Image (tube, grey):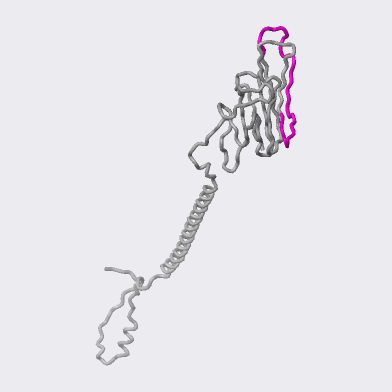
Amino acid sequence: MNGNFGHSPQPVFTVDSAGGHPKQDLYYHQQLPRPPVPCWTFPPARDEMKKRGWGTMNKGIVWVLILILLLVFAALGLGAYQILRLQTEMQRLTQEIPAQMQSPAPQKQVGLYPAELNKNKQNSAAHLIGCADQSKSSGTLKWEAKFGDAFTEGVKYINGGLLVNKTGLYFVYSRVEFISPKCNSRDSYTHIMSRQRNGHNRRIMEDHQEGICTVGSKHPWMTSSHLGSLQHLRQSDWLFVNVSHPHLISKNYHNNYFGLFKIN
């Protein structure tokens, strides 16, 4: 095998060291060329630098991964807190719903208004319809308060009148229908609503009309009267309706009515 190391090979002589020339033998061995040191016996400086660089990079990646994990855990914790807060709020709102709103049973309705809209609040309303039993002398109309579309809630019906149980603003109304088989020159009608308070009567609404038919006509005539207004009523006020000719009130009872309802 040929190799070029940059110098010519020198001869090698075998010398017997027993000849008594130690110095000469030492000098000869010092002059001999030494074999080259293999390059792989010691790690190069470049590899050492590379290893040091990779170690620094590995530490940086570890810190980045730790920070990412911390952010993930923080996000999970915040989400769990929000869910818990929403559940607590839903439980609070559920407890505040009134018991009557949670009940699946439908509420009973009587007449024009429900019998019970709120357990803590009673309605004040009434609607009365015409009655066949009318007195010709007093002029105060009698009404039906229990059958058909008639009802009373928070208001009492006593002897043709409505007794108010709560002070407040009310809308009060009445309608009557008159029918006569013939026309007389003196035919007229008066429709009055009165209020009795502390034993004193006062007219709060009135309708009066004359000349409602042609004199001498043999045909029956019919007319109607409407009353309605807002009234501030007090507790124990009594309302009633009077007409001039009770015997002329029509027998169509649903066309004759009297009522009220509380606004506030």
Image quadrant where residue 210 sits: top right
* Residue 69 in the image: above or below residue 29: above
Residue 248 coordinates in the image, percent (x, y): 66, 17
Q: Please say whether residue 235 is one of the residues in the magenta stretch.
A: no
Q: Please say whether residue 207 is one of the residues in the magenta stretch.
A: yes
* Number of marks: 0
**Residue drawn at (64%, 27%), measured in percent from left and top?**
258
- Farthest bottom residue in view: 20
Residue 226 coordinates in the image, percent (x, y): 68, 23
* Residue 131 in the image: above or below residue 153: above
Residue 225 coordinates in the image, percent (x, y): 69, 21
- Farthest front residue in view: 137
Q: Quadrant of the N terminus?
A: bottom left
Q: In which quarter of the image is the C terminus?
A: top right
Image quadrant where residue 17 sits: bottom left
From the viewer's side, name the closer residue of 80 and 263. 263
18 with respect to 257 (left or right) = left
From the viewer's side, name the closer residue of 156 and 247. 247
10 with respect to 109 (left or right) = left
* Residue 22 in the image: above or below residue 254: below
Q: Give the range drawn in magenta.
A: 194-221
**Residue drawn at (60%, 19%), measured in percent from left and top?**
252
83 with respect to 41 (left or right) = right
Image quadrant where residue 128 sits: top right
* Residue 142 in the image: above or below residue 167: above
Residue 98 coordinates in the image, percent (x, y): 54, 44
